[in-house]
Amino acid sequence: SAVISQKPSRDICQRGTSLTIQCQVDSQVTMMFWYRQQPGQSLTLIATANQGSEATYESGFVIDKFPISRPNLTFSTLTVSNMSPEDSSIYLCSVVIGQVRDIQYFGAGTRLSVL
Amino acid sequence: GEDVEQSLFLSVREGDSSVINCTYTDSSSTYLYWYKQEPGAGLQLLTYIFSNMDMKQDQRLTVLLNKKDKHLSLRIADTQTGDSAIYFCAESNYTGGFKTIFGAGTRLFVKA
């Protein structure tokens, strides 16, 4: 397995501001993802964080709103830009460890409230 | 497109067994997972099963996979109040790159 540290664990932000969420893994991983979980909902994939290149975004998510960086194999950031109350969600970092089998693990999440 | 469906609620008495069911549509699933989410927390991987397996047991947890019917179940023996949480079924495959599809989650209530 892997230890996934996600910071901050929660934040309350003002409309129009931006928040950067960090994800640090204690081992090299093959894939890193960012998910959003809106209140009472299941998980929605935002993007795949690619090391050293632009992230791959899912339909409905764009780089201007959710810029992602992944400078190395163990670290990634997700920024939620120009926030509105509709961005209030849990944001989850996820990794796939591919040593023997591709098993997907999740961080504890960042609970974001936008006022 | 691919879909994963599960019932939204399950209520059991403490000490009884819980069975959470899930159906999926993707015939090219490679792994099937069960995740647990407690209030305000992230997703904890409970167990997973490779698609060429029928059953996997891990302490109180038993996973059954019927690949023909595309049906996955999670049985929790001797359910405790600490098992109260949302349980997500998920399947992953490599079609067009690694992708995981999640169900809506089953909220398990354990009554003392």
Image (tube, coloured by chain):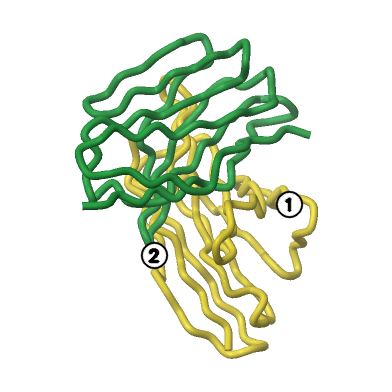
Q: On the rendered structure, is B13 left or right of A22? A: left
Which residue does the image show at 63% across and 45% down from the upper left? Answer: A50
Q: Position of residue A32 (x, y in %)?
A: 54, 45
Q: Is residue A26 left or right of residue B95?
A: left
Quickly name the residue at label 2: B40
- Figure chain in green: B
Residue in the image at 62% along x and 37% along y: B5
Q: Nearer the viewer, residue B59 or A47?
A: B59
What is the chain letter for disc 2?
B
Give me the residue at 67% from left, 82% from top: A84
Q: Is residue A85 above or below residue B44?
A: below
- Determine crowd level at label 2: few under 14, some 14-19, many 20+ residues with C-alpha closer than 10 A: few
Name the amino acid, label 2. Gly
* The hue in which chain A appears in the rendered picture of the protein: yellow
Q: Amino acid at mark 1?
A: Tyr
Residues A91 and A27: in front is: A91
For the C terminus of chain A, the quadrant is bottom right
Occupied quadrant, residue B22: top right
Crowd class of label 1 (few under 14; some 14 to 19; many from 20; radius 10 Å): some
On the rendered image, what quadrant is the N terminus of chain A found in? Answer: top left
The image position of residue B31, as x and y in percent, is 52, 24
Give the structural element (helix, strand or loop) at label 1.
strand
Which residue is rendered at x = 52% and y = 56% of the image?
A76
- Residue ID for mark 1: A57
Coordinates of residue A97 in the picture (x, y in percent): 44, 33
* Chain of the residue where label 1 is placed in the rendered structure: A
In this rendering, the answer to whether B85 lies above or below A80 is: above
Residue B96's x, y, as percent? 75, 29
Residue B68: which quarter of the image?
top right
* Residue B49, numbered circle: none
Numbered label tally: 2
